[in-house]
Image (cartoon, coloured by chain):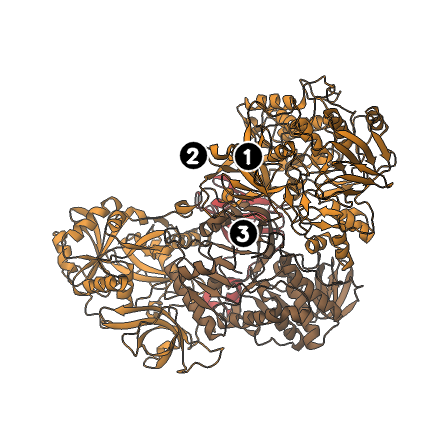
Amino acid sequence: MLLIPCPWCGPRDETEFHYGGQAHVAYPADPGALTDEEWARYLFFRDNPEGAFAERWSHAAGCRRWFNAVRDTATNRIHAVYRPGEPRPVTG
Amino acid sequence: MRGEHAVDDLPDPPGVLWRAPEPRRSYDVVIVGAGGHGLATAYYLARNHGITDVAVLERGWLAGGNMARNTAIIRSNYLWDESAGIYEHALKLWEGLEEELGHPLLFSQRGVLNLAHSLQDVRDGVRRVNANRLNGVDAEWLGPEEVGEVCPIVDVSPDVRHPVLGATYQPRAGIAKHDHVAWGFARAAAELGVHLVEHCEVTGIEVAGGRARAVLTAGGRIAAGTVALCAAGRTSVVAGTAGVELPLQSHTLQALVSELLEPVHPTVVMSNAVHVYVSQAHKGELVMGAGIDAANSYRQRGAFHVVERQMAAALELFPVFARAHVLRTWAGVVDVSPDASPIIGRTPVDGLLVNCGWGTGGFKATPGVGWCFAHTIAHGEPHPLAAPFSLDRFTTGALVDEHGAAAVAH
Amino acid sequence: MTRAAAGGRIDRSRVLRFRFDGRDLTGHPGDTLASALLAAGVRRVATSVRFGRPRGIFSAGPEEPNAIVQIEEPFPEPMLTATTVELYDGLVARGLSGRGRLADRPDPARYDAVHAHCDVLVVGAGPAGLSAARAAAADGARVIVADEQPEPGGVLLGLPGGVPPGSLAPPGAVPSGSLGLSGALPLVSGESAGPPGAEWAAATAAELSRLPEVRVLPRTTVVGHYDGNHLVAVERRTAHLGAAAPAWMARERVWRIRARRVVLATGAHERPIAFAGNDLPGVMLAGAARTYANRYAVLPGRRAVVFTTDDAAYAAALDLAGAGVRILAVADARPGPNGRWRERVREHGIEVLAGGVVAEARGTGEVTSVVTGDGREFEADLLLVSGGWNPVVHLFCQVGGTVRFDDGLQAFVPDTPPPAVEVAGAARGLTSLHDCLADGAAAGTRAAEALGGGGSRAGTGRPGTGRDRQAGGGSPERRGGVRRAADGAPQANGHALWLVPADDCSTHFVDLQRDVTVADIRRATGAGLRSVEHVKRHTTAGTAHDQGKTSGTLVPAIVAGELGVHVREVGVTSFRPPYTPVSFAALAGRDRGALHDPVRVTPMHGWHVERGAVFENAGQWKRPRYYPREGEDMAAAVLRECRAVRGGAGAMDVSTLGKIEVRGPDAAGFLDRLYTNLMGTLRPGSIRYGVMCRADGMVFDDGTVIRLAEDRFLATTTTGNAAAVLDWMEEWLQTEWPSLRVYCTSVTEQWATVALAGPAARDVLSGLAPRLAADAADFPFMTWRDTEVAGMPARVCRISFSGELAYEINVGAWHGPALWSAVLDTGRVTPYGTEAMHVLRAEKGYPIIGQDTDGTVTPADLGMEWMISKKKADFVGRRSLTRADTVRRDRRHLVGLLPEDPGLLIPEGTQLVEHERLPAPPVRSLGHVTSSYLGAGLGRTFALALVSGGRDRIGDRIFAVLDGGQAPVAVASPVLYDPEGARRDG
């Protein structure tokens, strides 16, 4: 079970959180202007790296705030957490 | 009943399974991943299409990924016509596979119950039974009492938190011994001239002029007329080396077994609402699985709370399991697609074909997908049963949404 | 009897009676079932699974592969090792043949779980573990020590009194003696200067327990070690009490421990050697025999031969000799046995066969003689075997540590540790007591220091900080591998002997529990298998109850021999949790029955129960499905309830509908982005029905939206989706549109809501709410009013889900029962449940999201194009509605169906086809029946269905596929009852 450092509440067990998939996938400014292919990319295509992954979590059973984390999907180690809207931090 | 000492011993696989070949520098077809799907594809390429200049490259030991880790449930009672087509094709092949391969697979058609715990589960179950019948898939709807007759240890009393209101039943469904399935295909493919190369990780796919030309491995470059991915949870990583992006997310999926127990569980039981699936394997161990761990992961180690929840769910259904013991837990990495259906066929790179997105349910499809994917490779055109599972469905929106049938999946 | 008159850690003053395989036997507190059986002279305990061979007791701990038993009383429990079952009065057990039996009755015991956090978790309370705990605690760390045994001490419990402590020992009273693994000076019973090890352990544990920040957990096995130093342990609290276990106490308790650092002091397992007949009762690990002699005062035999590859077995031989066992010979496979040991045993008249092996254990049912490699046959009933020691690296590997093969020790030892994990003592290959004590202390100090000098009291850093990781790195010399003793001499003296060669290896057992022999391994390698994982699967070695604890190094070593490679190239199979088997019930804990999933009930629930309502589960809610009267079945009750609504007035408890208050200056714009239709134009005081889609354009939820004020809305959701809709709103707000000033609050449980429906509803309401202007003109459809109903402040909404004149009366949850009673006490209102509601709404063609939709249905499929706003640029899902597949004309549309036989009720879930006679499969389905009822308003049966191109088929005759044949049905508009909406205003 991951120990996830909520930026607002501190480290908590994974069971308190809800997973939100890849971070930094912005809702398109004008979906109507997109081709079907572009819209399909927004809907269905997400990065799936083995390694550092910027992803979204919600502290669903805590403060209910969303935040982002950089986690290594090969080791499950969390390298950084940051608030929505902040740029992805550089991690080692 | 089996006698106390006459535990069903696993049958001896035939003498020689396969030998490690010296890889050539070039093949007509290179299949990436020697799991069940890769091995079955290689076998049917050789058997159905006469294509034997084939290598199956495996990063670890043969069939040591999800093939070694799944709960080995076989069924074809999927909702949509597209799914029923390919899974039922697979089930028909399963029914003749021991003879076809000349290999003991411990294929046991002991039936599967998919339990309903709410009125909506009942509607969905009845709908699926009726859809299955139109597709020639054997299916029955059972009331709670009939569920109790098929599987007496299921608690069908109305006073539990999520009472059993009925179940779909597919009598032809069952289980098989996963290792034997892999070895059966491996042996048969090797006998037809296919090269099975273990400990040979594909680190890249060489693309030139929009076409896949070769795979790169630690042991060097291997040229290929066609590169076919059967890499399950690692598909995104391998395809990414050719610049191909796929709508897949890799997740950890856990399963476990108990110690050997006298026969108590005659069938396979799955429940979406309480989230568990369980069978009793040939030797007597209870084999159980649960849902995927939530977060993307390439780690073959899951989180323990998932197992704890799974146990709670299991005891709700099977109170007699209380003092059974978990002997071993493990995890695999599955590639999940947006509609819980596979992706089979061409990619934007010519000569690079994928078979992926099987999520938690790939084992049961093994012979069927091998058959269809081999056809797709041989003809450069999707097999009709594979055609609905093309990548472009995500653009058109023509999804094959099996979340209902596959929610716990498999 | 083979029990010594004195000695051992058993309480002879009390006698425990038990029954095994039908024989009534006795033992004492302090016994395990295994020691009591040995004391009673029971040699054959179980039968092997594959060959039906007799099996005895092989070890003295959880690594036992042979003595697998079924507990029958006080409650059936399958597949326990006799070596770990503490004896209790009234125990009834029997030996198994590899398979256990589940109880045929429910387990009455309770189970529980605990969360714990600590600075340092020490796994194992042997010499290294206790030293580590003491050192860490001395540094101020919060410490938990968990140990599987009933009392602390680990291997010390099996040692006799000891020899003087050496110079490496930490200050204070330290135990004396050798672990018997190898290396240190010989020790023999009776030689003692320091306190006996077990006493030191007890005193140390007591000292630790007195510290406020230290917790010592006996009978607690750490079974899993997961990422982030999350460890799972199982504490056995009452099993050792048998029938005397208090019912109130949890039988087993799962500890979920989050540790900032972990010290693994898990010890080592002795391993066997493969030779002919090595499975016979009477063949026993040397260390185990020593434990039985010292700890339990039991002699496992009278005449013994020792077969060893290291020094450890000599100590065992001497202890047993001292206790009265005649040791006939020590066959030491090493060409040059340790001279000091050899001298020592010779002093006791024991012959040492240098370079000797045991070729065969002979006997029928048990060992009666032992044949050595030189052909001599010794009449013996006991054969002690020591093939070396395997560090217990299970937890270490579970969490990602890697091992390497140590040639000195001839075993796999920890190599690269995972973050924040230390390994100490025998678990990393140390073999002398002095070294283990010192190593444990050093590991404990390192762990505490890594926390920032003083553990919790000083440190505030979180696990995984840079500092932590740096400290966790350590130097390879400190952290892994076999340390060298102070004098620099290698301590390990392992000798590679895995099997005694023979032509026929069919009784050279490798995995005793799975009956796997060297011959089986040869067949696997002969089949071309080269991976130890393949061999494991081919032979099943290592997959049994002990998960390869005794076979785990033997198998790869023999495979290596067959393949002609070094064992390090073969490696080990994966170590997978749990370390020892864990009962399902322990893991399920309290999450059983009502606590498996919380039950939610409305404020009026008591009334429903009292009136005999039949409930359905809707999400976590209990909702009345119908209220049967005397003699009524469901159909009769539902018909009566429907007629009441269509003909007079009915009341339904709809408190379960989700209610979300959406508030803030940007609330209107926010809702416009989520609902398909316009909410921003809604006026305060009014209500609008809305539909939400997922981004893929599929309908996700529906409900009414009330505008309470310019900046304040109340959105209702379906019962099952309330949490999901709130999550959905918050996700968009926080992650996509954080600039919007909107707050969402769930108020579902703040309100109790009664739907009052039927032509008489206005009359009834007026009577209860005299101050409300209830005329259609004053209180039009889709508006709401704040007023008083039955004297309670209420918000009344004029909405209808039945097509009848209807109101939803909302009061504070506290007032719910009073409101409900007031409505029913008018005597004019019939309570109705969800089933009648379903019929009534279906007659009007109102879909139920989740029943008439399945996640593949668009608003247009539901015939709700009118719900898709043309005025706003976007809403979530809009773009998906113009894709190739979502604009197909033959998509499945929600339509009505009228069976040609107006009395035929078509089951929900029935498939629909074009063919009057069903052709052979596969047959293309046109769609399926989503809802089907006998309509009170229609006076006939009808259905709703999703039908391909359904709106273009209205009037067509299609066929429902029923068990008895095809039933013709007419496709119709989904709105079958009162299509002009005349009844809405009463």
Q: Secondary structure at mark 2?
A: loop
The disc at residue C18 is: 1
Task: In the picture, one chain is red; tell me its letter.
Answer: A
Residue C803 x, y percent position in the rendering: 23, 66
Q: Say which chain tag 1 marks.
A: C
Residue identified by numbered label 3: B293
Image-based side of C878 in relation to C542, left or right: left
Residue identified by numbered label 2: C248
Residue B360 x, y percent position in the rendering: 56, 59
* Colour given to chain C in the rendered image: orange
Residue B141 x, y percent position in the rendering: 42, 66
**Residue kind at label 3, given as amino acid type:** Asp
Image quarter hosting the N terminus of chain B: bottom right
The residue shown at (78%, 35%) is C305
Q: Are marks 3 and 2 on the same chain?
A: no
Residue in the foreground of this view, choosing between C273 and C68: C68
Q: Say which chain tag 3 marks.
A: B
Residue in the foreground of this view, choosing between C229 and C746: C229
Q: Say which chain tag 2 marks.
A: C
The local crowd at label 1, few if under 14, some if 14 to 19, many if 20 or more residues have their Cα within 10 Å, is: many
Task: In the picture, one chain is brown; tell me its letter.
Answer: B
Image quadrant in which you'd find residue B248 = bottom right
Q: Is residue C460 visible?
A: no
**Residue kind at label 2, given as amino acid type:** Trp
Mark 2 vs mark 1, CA separation in Å: 24 Å
Compared with C332, C947 (above or below) is below
The local crowd at label 3, few if under 14, some if 14 to 19, many if 20 or more residues have their Cα within 10 Å, is: many
Image-based side of B22 in relation to C35, left or right: right
Compared with C334, C718 (above or below) is below
